[in-house]
Amino acid sequence: MIIFVKKFKWGIIGPGVIANKFAKAIKGINNMEICAVASSSFYKADKFAKEYKITNSYGSHEEMLLNRDIDAVYISTVNSAHYDNIMMCLDKGVPVLCEKPMVMSLKEFDDILNKSKEKKVALMEAMWTNLIPSMVEIKKHIENGTIGNISLAFIDFCVKFNKNPESRIYNKDLGGGVIFDLGVYNLHTVFNLFGEGYDFMSVCGAKGDTGVDIRSMLTFSYPNGMIVNTLTSDSTKGPYSMRIYGDKGSILSESFNDSQRFTINYDDGNIKEFLCPYDINGFEYEIREFSEVVKLGRLESEAVSLDRSRKVCEIMEDVHNNICKN
């Protein structure tokens, strides 16, 4: 007997650079396909559709959502457009996987959260770093006590950007700010590995010429005495590393947000390297996670919960506002 499994069909809103990585991952996953793509520019949507052999292309987001074949939508527009895009999809009853940061303020987050619950439609932030094999393995080692009691961790994500004031990094109208572009990874990683039960957070940072944050240092202290320090910057090429120190050893992950290896250095001098290759390009794990959420009729993922995304959103908004208030 031949059993036919229905393909999970995606729509894409915003066929930009990141959407290419998403589309390449979909091509390598069985029983999934992209059936529609939409942009405010039909030319961009059509060009993307031809490149990835997508059947339907639209010059209107609303028009694409009339396509009843779509099981979920992936949103990869500029940050400032996420809120309207998400609300439109949820209103139409279409599950949403949205690029980070999902929205720009806590008020917007509560709006989309309430809409998801009201419509009973799944919603998830596309925080792929939480789900890649290396991060899953690092979390297991922390929970299993491989390096003992952790006292100190550093999570750094710094990039030397092209200083174009009209780019998405620096333009306030596009949702600019380094805390939103890089710091979101740091914060999700802190809470994924160490939990949200910190008792104090300190912040220092700098504002750029366009009125958005360009670098920041956030330090979290936990009740057990653990200190976690995070760093972002727009003007240095690295570091991108994560270093975690316990009383039995330490864990080092270079380019932690997109890493396929990490090292444990034990206090007795032994060093062990762990290789965690991707099946495709790293995006496949968040894609599989969200499709399972939708197929099981759930409203959110446990691995990238809405509560955690809400907390990250709250901190990012506060940090950005405090740095840029003057």
Image (cartoon, rainbow, N blue to C red):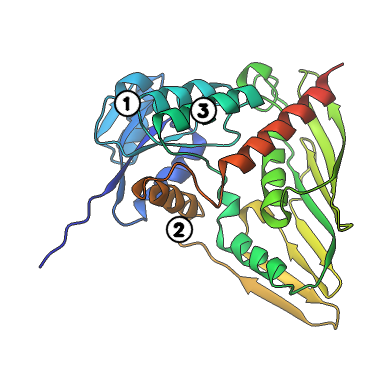
How many angstroms separate mark 2 from mark 1 (CA)? 28 Å
Image: 187 above or below 265: above
Label 2 amino acid?
A: Ile
Kindly state the secondary structure of the residue where label 1 is placed.
Answer: loop
Q: Please state which of residues 218 and 43 is positioned toward the viewer in this rendering.
A: 218
User: What residue does disc 1 label?
Assistant: 65
Q: Is the residue marked by circle 3 packed among few (<14), some (14-19), or many (20+) residues within 10 Å?
A: few
Label 3 is placed on what type of residue? Asn
Q: Which residue is mark 2?
A: 280
Q: Residues within 10 Å of mark 2 (few under 14, many from 20)?
A: some
- Would you name the residue on which mark 3 appears? 114
Q: Quadrant of the C terminus?
A: top right
The furthest residue to the front: 118
**Relative image position of residue 88 (x, y in whole percent):** 42, 22
Q: Quadrant of residue 183?
A: top right
Classify residue 120 by image quadrant. Answer: top left
Q: Amino acid at mark 1?
A: Leu
Residue at image point 41% right, 19% down: 40
Q: Is 39 displayed left or right of 252 in the figure?
A: left
Relative height, residue 192 to residue 177 (above, below): below
Contact check, label 2 and label 3, Cβ < 8 Å: no
Point out the frontmost of discs 3 and 1. 3
Q: Is residue 117 left or right of residue 53?
A: right
Quadrant (top left, top right, bottom left, bottom right) of the N terminus: bottom left
